[in-house]
Amino acid sequence: MRLGVLDIGSNTVHLLMVDAERDARPAPAVDRSSTMRLMRYLEDDGRISDAGVAALSSAVGRASAAAARFGPDEMIGIATSAIREATNGPAVLDRLEQVAGVPLQVLTGRQEAELTFLAARRWHGWAAGRLLVLDIGGGSLEIATGIDERPDYAASVPLGAGRLTREFLRSDPPTEPEIDELRAYVRAALAPVAKELAALPAPDRVVGTSKTFRSLARLAGQRVAVVGPEERRRMQLADLQDWTPRLAKIPAEQRMELPGITPERTYQIVAGAMVAQRAMKALGVDELEICPWALREGVLLRRLDRLGD
């Protein structure tokens, strides 16, 4: 069975398709994305601009056409924080559903955290023990922890790399006052989450998902193994603390010359690094491991579970 997920996120419109059968690992068939950086299209009143809606429609149209060429048995459409929080979100969603030709489910922040946690649990297995999973998106930071496939605790915090870049880091490279203001905001936003997590058992393994963590780990982490086609990396807080202020002093165009910093991430990698660093510090994490599976894989895995039932 060929299953596909169309993910309309804050940074990208992403199409992932897998060939799946019961009790087998999903085999990737198609993996394509279009960079959006949707936060740059937000108006002061919180609506997505006409130009942003047009860009979204074009990207969704391309993804839908690509999906049709590969003949999925079923397509799942999801939208995350950018659509969820936009003041014209329902109208934008109606238009995108017409373009996509499939219903689009707007996930809550908690659902994003839970599905990402499921993907990380399946990837790392039961031997990983209690997991703590961190995922930095364009609009939000998802945090989840637990011992089972459903987390004991899941939260979504408005600390996405794209959102914070738009709201705080207006200069290129950012100024010291901008950095200080962002640092204080991130610290305050994480404080209640850190307090709640402190009351729970400590994790046996900490996992970072999302392209932001993968980019930072290529820059500041260490390659520790290769598992099949997957590269496994770990990143220590000390290394990230060393790199974050250095990134903030480099113009966006020059950051692309660094390992792991891609053109679509270069403008928001400073904010992403600050969130990653502060989250690790606030939650008492000295080292984390990068997981290649995240939200889209979680959506597909949940669907496959229902198929098996």
Image: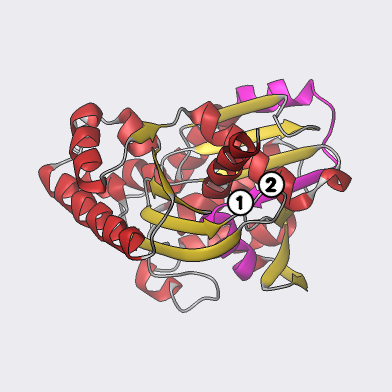
Q: Residue 103: x and y, percent?
A: 32, 36
* Left or right: 304, with 270 as reference point: right
* Left or right: 93, with 213 as reference point: left
Q: Residue 66: x and y, percent?
A: 32, 63
State which quadrant residue 168 falls in.
Answer: top left
Residue occupying the point 49% across, 69% down: 261
Q: What amino acid is at disc 1?
A: Thr
Whether residue 122 is visible: yes
Q: Nearer the viewer, mark 1 or mark 2?
A: 2
- Do callouts 1 and 2 mark residues in contact (Cβ within 8 Å)? yes
State which quadrant residue 87 falls in.
Answer: top left
**Boundaries of the magenta span:** 191-219
Label of residue 184 in the image: none
Above or below residue 216? Residue 281 is above
Residue designated by label 1: 209
Dot 1: element: strand
Q: Residue 166: x and y, percent?
A: 32, 45
Numbered circles on residues, count = 2
Above or below residue 168? Residue 287 is below
Residue count near mark 1 (Cα–Cα under 10 Å), binned few <14, some 14–19, many ≥20: many
Residue lying farthest to the bottom in this orientation: 257
Is 241 in front, or is 114? 114
Residue occupying the point 36% across, 49% down: 169
Label of residue 120 in the image: 2
Above or below residue 177? Residue 246 is below
Residue occupying the point 51% across, 41% down: 183
Residue 56 falls inside the magenta stretch: no
